[in-house]
Amino acid sequence: MSSTSSQLADRLRREIDNMPAQLQSATKYIIDHPADFGIDSIRVTAEKIGVSTNVIVRLARHLGFDGFESFRHPFRRNLVTDGEDRLSRDWLTQMSNASGFGSDQAGFSRNELNVVSRSLRQLDPTSVQAAITYMVDANQCFVTATRASYALAYYFHYAGRMAHPGMQLIPRHMGSAIDDLLCTGRSDCLFAITVHPYSADTIRAIRFAKDKGARIILLADSDVIAPGVEPDVSLTVSTRSLHQFSSFSGAMAVLEVLLGHLFAAKGDAGYNRVQDYQKAREDAGAYWQPARLPRVQKKQ
């Protein structure tokens, strides 16, 4: 079948009244939570609805699909952007032709697309491979940044530590990054993020770690940020913006590429650590869970 998620949702709305009670419950859930349905496994979906996995398979076959995966595919496809590069920019042209707010938004949007494209285009695979090798082989991989760039470092560490348990975000406890680098050495690396105006704290941390023999990976908007800063790997991103602060969309895109490589390098071990993290969070009640949906009574 080649139905879109919207077409399927419309069909489910039309047919829900004539379905058995359990299929009604599953149908209502899919209509109300199409994004979750597109992401979750059949087991998770069944648990959220409060039915068996067989009910979802029955619903899929009722709609003409051969199973759960083909049924979920249109909803999953609606969440990803695999085909965006092949789509036209008519939406941007139409927005540009609008006056006032719409035209301004088109300008901001075009700038962000250009920032991301430029950052990814100039991302040299050889440099990326070297950076990943340094991180994977390091006993400790320190990640540092300050002020606005700290948000990038925090996210990269938050996700990256699940692949590489030796990854550490510094500075800790509102101190200096140098405090956390005192015992660093040749078996470690420092991943530093800074953009203009460059952080004096980050520059000092880079110099200090370099003197200790650690490998330096620098993500910045220039290959040369200050005298005496000589990274082993330099990843240069575009930060051009149409406001007074740097755009971080290109830097974030590069970090996502690095995370993809990092998890690929760690293989099953990285995947299993993510599952362990998720289970621990779920057991601790870290995520909100909806109450079990009430059964939908079939109309008489």
Image: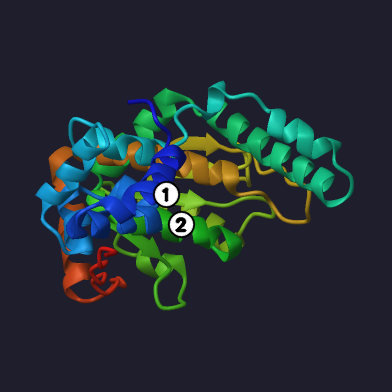
Q: Residues within 10 Å of mark 2 (few under 14, many from 20)?
A: many
Q: What number is the disc on residue 191? A: 1
Give the CA separation, mark 1 to mark 2: 9 Å
Q: Nearer the viewer, residue 176 or 25?
A: 25
Quarter location, residue 136: top left
Seen in the picture, residue 19 relative to 78 is either above or below; the reply is: below
Residue 299 is situated, as x and y percent measured from the top left of the image, at 29, 64
First in sequence: mark 1 vs mark 2: 2
Residue 151 in view, yes or no: yes
> Total marks drawn?
2
Q: Residue at x 59, y 62 (%)?
A: 148
Q: Residue at x 42, y 57 (%)?
A: 155
Give the x, y percent position of residue 74. Answer: 37, 36
Provide the secondary structure element on which disc 2 rests.
helix
Left or right: 235 as drawn, with respect to 261: right
Q: Residue furthest right?
A: 99
> What's under tag 2, amino acid-wise?
Ala
Closer to viewer: mark 1 or mark 2: 2
| Residue beneath disc 2 | 153
In the picture, which quadrant includes the N terminus?
A: top left
202 left or right, relative to 48: right
Instruction: Quadrant for the C terminus, please.
Output: bottom left
* 83 or 201: nearer the viewer: 83
Residue 113, which numbered label? none
Which residue is found at the position 35% from the left and 29% from the top? Answer: 129
Q: Is residue 181 above or below residue 257?
A: below
Q: Secondary structure at mark 1?
A: strand
Q: Label 1 amino acid?
A: Phe
Q: Are marks 1 and 2 in contact (CB under 8 Å)?
A: yes
> Observer-nearest residue: 162 or 284?
284
